[in-house]
Amino acid sequence: MRGTFTEQARGIQIVSAAIEVIAEHGYSAASMGRIADRIGVSRALLNYHFRNREALIEAVVTEVYATGYRAVRPGMDAETTASGQLRAFIRGSVNFYLQSPQHIAALTEIIAGTQKGDFRPVAEHVSTELEAVALLFRDGQRAGEFRDFDPYVMARSVRGALDATLGARAADPDLDLDHCGDELIMLFENATKAG
Amino acid sequence: MRGTFTEQARGIQIVSAAIEVIAEHGYSAASMGRIADRIGVSRALLNYHFRNREALIEAVVTEVYATGYRAVRPGMDAETTASGQLRAFIRGSVNFYLQSPQHIAALTEIIAGTQKGDFRPVAEHVSTELEAVALLFRDGQRAGEFRDFDPYVMARSVRGALDATLGARAADPDLDLDHCGDELIMLFENATKAG
Amino acid sequence: MRGTFTEQARGIQIVSAAIEVIAEHGYSAASMGRIADRIGVSRALLNYHFRNREALIEAVVTEVYATGYRAVRPGMDAETTASGQLRAFIRGSVNFYLQSPQHIAALTEIIAGTQKGDFRPVAEHVSTELEAVALLFRDGQRAGEFRDFDPYVMARSVRGALDATLGARAADPDLDLDHCGDELIMLFENATKAG
Amino acid sequence: MRGTFTEQARGIQIVSAAIEVIAEHGYSAASMGRIADRIGVSRALLNYHFRNREALIEAVVTEVYATGYRAVRPGMDAETTASGQLRAFIRGSVNFYLQSPQHIAALTEIIAGTQKGDFRPVAEHVSTELEAVALLFRDGQRAGEFRDFDPYVMARSVRGALDATLGARAADPDLDLDHCGDELIMLFENATKAG
DNA sequence: AATGAATGAGATTTCATTCAT
DNA sequence: AATGAATGAAATCTCATTCAT
């Protein structure tokens, strides 16, 4: 039965395996076979739990964003000022990477591998996040904390700077992410602050 | 003979077709067959001109970077201050996109599609560019134009912000890139300027 | 599960088909496609049962040697003298050909087709057999049955003479193998006997 | 023009290159491309000088047999007895290998690679040689030098023993061919000698 | 709930050959 | 006499998916 406990457990197990495999081998090399092998299960089982590969990828994306949300949101909610929330967002994102590098890696791979074509499992999440950050900027501007700038361009730039940093860390595990986080916070504080 | 006029012409034609197809369909969907079809030749011809798919992709990357260099460099060289060069770099990058959106799109796809695995055709170009921009920042700091910050984090952030902006434009052709360029210039001027 | 009845049955069926096709068309003409066609299955099925062509060829070689061993060994074990075993070996080899000409033909083709290059699926079997026959000769020499000669040269010559004979039979189905067997036995009796 | 000096010279050059490449890489890996590369010439040139690959292979076979004939025949003609000729044949064959190992290797590869199918470039040469050796045995039997045996089986056995020995040498360059030659001579003297 | 068996589509590559120049 | 350009055919392999059990 759909929704069974076993069924749910298997689903989570498969999604986890998928995250690992995508993070390690990349999106297109993460074949159903490789994911199935990772948990010692038949390929057919993945098709039993997920209608097709796209559905599995979508589940992965949902899972990653949910995890990220849980990692970043509390810190932001604890802040009362927009600039505080911005700091919390950057710091939280960096920490999320430190805690769940495979989630980020998998997500990056999926974004990369699905830019073209009909299947865009991330589009909605991306614009949701973008909206949230842009809103943060707008609020800050209204509150007089931030200077006048296009909140969407700024939001995309934060996202891009984070992505670039996290990508660099993926390539070089010795990169000091804490330091980078400090630098990014300073960068965007200077970039946004009023007056 | 290698270097024949016809040979070169075909080579260019194939690389151009590859750029188009990659830009449209993405890296992994850009099969030799599809690229060949685009110019109405046999698949075997691509293997005649390029030892294998990797070699063709490498040629694409080289071509894109060469084009980008020609588009961005002159503007930077015309500037004498570090902050002027930074402005020129951002402006030039945005203009490059406006002139050659497919080049950028193809490059993005290739970067995305080759992150994992042995074949990393872009790695060297990326770090070369990163070094150049980081050097620019260091020079500006020494000259007292820029405040104190980690030049590599800043360089990666510029790159990331540009990528995010250009990616957004790819998704939404109505996005006003000139405006975004202005915003990015202001963003990084505020982020870097001394005092 | 590996080792399922159906799995084994298919495996045997595929190996048999491979033997037939190789025997008929030769090693390099025995493509996965032709073998698959022979039993009316898809090419992909062969790759499902055997990781790749090499693995299938190896299975063929193993099967042929196993069959040959079963055909030749009992007769040799029934003999107590070295010269009796030599006779049994030659006779058994000829009979093996009469019973399973395709096995021999396939093996010959595989040996022929894989002499150069890294893939040498037969090397070990060949040297194992050579050792066994050379040992037989050495024992016979120690027992005083055989004259003094280099047992390895003799063993290779027996193998070579058998191969040449069986090759001739492949070219001319009218060749009387029983007669050839008698002649070969006499030949090597005279060649080896003491005094 | 066909028959031109240049044309002939090129033909020889191509055949030599083919022998080398076949000897090194095997029959099926000896593509027109690889052979052409060996002498730094275009693939198309091979097709200019030889109607097709088969024709080139035939030329190779002819060349190898001609060379072998020149290497072995004189020694045999110098002998007056059948057993002397047999010795000369074996010794000459071994020496031929020592002098022209690539010729032998190429021939072996071609025989191996063309056993099945329509194209049998060696068949005639093989049976010509076989006839000659069988005739030698018949003559020896009539002269009372040799015992009674089937001359064709014996001829094939000599051929087979030589092939096996030369094959072993190909696998192990340390094999002492002179010693093997002595052993083979003794082997077949014992195998053939009267009473 | 899970699997083994099987398939069809598609990808890359190699090759012998042709043809205009 | 020689070549560059081009092709069509074939081969191997991988993959997502289906289906009966």
Image: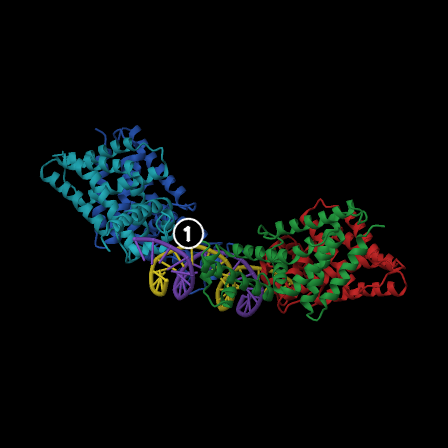
Chain colours: A cyan, B blue, C green, D red, E purple, F yellow
Q: Is residue A192 above or below residue B27?
A: above
**Horizontal and vertical percent position of residue A147:** 14, 37
> Which of D88/D103 is in front?
D88
Q: Chain of mark 1?
A: B
Q: How many marks?
A: 1
> Which of B182/D123 is in front?
D123
Is A142 situated left or right of A52 in this image?
A: left
**Horizontal and vertical percent position of residue D109:** 65, 58
- Kindly state the secondary structure of the residue where label 1 is placed: helix
Amino acid under disc 1: Ile
- Whether residue C98 can be seen here: yes
**Label 1 sits on residue:** B57
Q: Is disc 1 surrounded by few (<14), some (14 to 19) or many (20+) residues within 10 Å? A: many
**Horizontal and vertical percent position of residue A45:** 33, 54
Please give the name of the residue rendered at 18% of the width and 35% of the height, measured from the top-left corner: A75
**Horizontal and vertical percent position of residue C14:** 51, 62
Q: Quadrant for residue B130, please give it.
A: top left
In the rendered view of the protein, which quadrant contains the N terminus of chain B?
bottom right
- Whether residue D9 can be seen here: no
Is C29 situated left or right of B139 in this image?
A: right
